[in-house]
Image: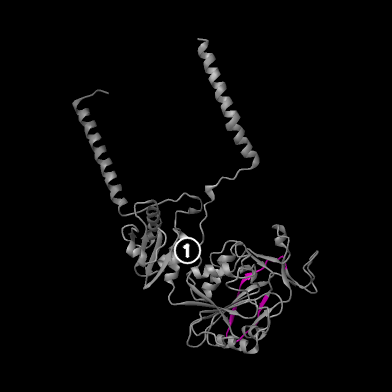
């Protein structure tokens, strides 16, 4: 191709047009970047992205939110806090973040009772809460506490050998109660024999497996509490009801004889026959978001009978391979069609009614209380289920448990053979290969 003044002018014009279009594209991209945001989280379990439950919580918090971080903004803790809070600000633009330097402003730090650098103070709607740990779970738990409107008072019935909400024994409920308190519940114990009155501001009354009979007057107080629209959580166990038969009759709940035995647990390596597993959940707010197994030791089956005004729905059921064993749970346990009830069996019932002049009244009855005990709370989704039950009973359907995000890609687990192979490779094979390569190069150069 001949180069002429005309062709030279053509190529220069083409080059100028290309540069102009390139600069325009770069400018357009820069302009768009100031108005639109895109972020990709490629970590396992998306641990650098807010969970859907945290996002839902932020969407439902109407009005400005203020967070004060007591840390030096330019130091390691301050930068970590800023990165974490930036995720929240992307979903709530009216979230204001303020950093307080503990070194420069010691008076404010002392006034707020701050002990450690990195503590966070959250203010919303005239309420405040603190988070002492920089993590999504700690921060969202604190947000949940300030998001609750009004006091949430959870009263455990005591004085009849019930599971102790403050006890550290295997069958007690301290770990579960600690989780509820971290999410804004005020928990206390009531002995009707000492104080024969259920407080009027009780959000939820809990009966956690009494082992001694309640007096008729105490049962009447509980029934009066229900008649006034109170919410109730009843964690029962297989065996006698210890004077609570009138309560079960009023609610239309019948407890089946025996202990639920689930043959599925044998396949999963659980040798004790009295353990039942729940892997599939019905469509109910309590079980929303549950995708893990829940484990129930020594559970009784429940049946819902017609009760005036109450609507009952089973939200937990055992598998089709389960049955209610009425015989001894020792040796070889087999289903007896003449005595035992075949599954699936109801493990939990949710009851609702609309009393005159009040909102929806809610009751949850479960045939097992061990699944929330200190021993078994950490199994599967037991903790999440327990928190969901209490949130539903308290009317906080949207404030579901914030899951803990794990980091499965931070640890490499190798088999013994793989470890041996890698060790021999780096200690023997690789040095030997380098030695042979070096000798080969040396011999080749020597022969020239």
SS of the residue at dot 1?
Answer: helix
Determine if the magenta segment contains residue 314: yes
Q: Name the residue under label 1.
A: 53
Q: Quadrant location of the N terminus? A: top left
Q: Quadrant of residue 422?
A: top right
- Residue 184: x and y in percent read 47, 71
Q: What stretch is highlighted in magenta?
A: 302-322
Residue at x 58%, y 69% (from the top left corner): 174
Regarding residue 94, the answer to whether it shows in the image is no
Q: Position of residue 206 (x, y in %)?
A: 58, 78
> Tell me, what colour scheme is on the image?
one colour
Q: Is residue 339 visible?
A: yes
Can you name the residue that lies furthest to the top here? 448
Q: Is residue 97 left or right of residue 202?
A: left
Q: Where is residue 257 in the image (x, y as percent from the top left)?
A: 73, 76
Quadrant for residue 310, please give it.
bottom right
Q: Is residue 139 magenta?
A: no
């Amino acid at each position: 191709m001949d180069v002429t003044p005309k062709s030279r002018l053509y190529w220069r014009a083409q080059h100028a047009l290309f540069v102009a279009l390139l600069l325009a594209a770069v400018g357009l991209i820069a302009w768009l970047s100031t108005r639109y945001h895109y972020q990709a989280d490629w970590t396992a379990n998306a641990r650098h992205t807010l969970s859907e439950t945290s996002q839902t919580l932020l969407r439902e918090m109407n009005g400005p939110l203020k967070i004060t971080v007591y840390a030096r903004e330019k130091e390691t803790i301050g930068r970590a806090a800023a990165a974490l809070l930036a995720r929240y600000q992307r979903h709530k633009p009216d979230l204001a973040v303020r950093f307080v330097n503990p070194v420069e402003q010691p008076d404010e730090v002392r006034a707020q009772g701050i002990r450690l650098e990195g503590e966070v103070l959250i203010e919303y709607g005239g309420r405040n809460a603190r988070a002492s740990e920089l993590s999504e779970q700690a921060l969202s738990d604190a947000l949940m506490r300030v998001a609750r409107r009004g006091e949430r008072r959870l009263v455990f019935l005591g004085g009849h050998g019930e599971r102790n909400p403050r006890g550290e024994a295997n069958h007690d409920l301290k770990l579960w109660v600690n989780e509820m308190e971290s999410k804004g519940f005020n928990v206390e114990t009531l002995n009707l024999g000492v104080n024969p009155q259920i407080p009027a501001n009780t959000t939820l009354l809990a009966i956690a497996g009494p082992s001694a009979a309640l007096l008729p007057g105490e049962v009447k107080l509980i029934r009066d509490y229900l008649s006034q629209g109170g919410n109730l959580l009843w964690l029962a166990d297989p065996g006698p009801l210890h004077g609570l038969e009138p309560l079960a009759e009023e609610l239309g709940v019948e407890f089946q004889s025996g202990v639920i035995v689930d043959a599925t647990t044998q396949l999963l390596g659980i040798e004790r026959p009295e353990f039942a597993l729940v892997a599939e959940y019905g469509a109910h707010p309590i079980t929303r978001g549950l995708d893990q197994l829940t484990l129930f030791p020594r559970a009784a089956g429940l049946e819902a009978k017609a009760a005036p005004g109450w609507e009952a729905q089973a939200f937990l059921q055992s598998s089709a391979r389960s049955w209610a064993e009425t015989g001894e749970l020792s040796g070889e346990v087999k289903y007896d069609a003449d005595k035992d009830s075949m599954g699936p069996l109801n493990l939990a019932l949710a009851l609702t009614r609309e009393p005159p002049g009040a909102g929806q009244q809610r009751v949850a009855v479960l045939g097992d209380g061990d699944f929330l005990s200190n021993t078994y709370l950490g199994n599967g989704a037991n903790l999440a289920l327990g928190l969901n039950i209490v949130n539903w009973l308290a009317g906080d359907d949207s404030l579901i448990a914030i899951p803990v995000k794990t980091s499965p890609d931070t640890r490499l687990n190798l088999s013994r053979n793989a470890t041996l192979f890698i060790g021999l490779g780096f200690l023997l094979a690789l040095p030997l290969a380098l030695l042979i390569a070096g000798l080969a190069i040396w011999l080749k150069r020597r022969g020239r």
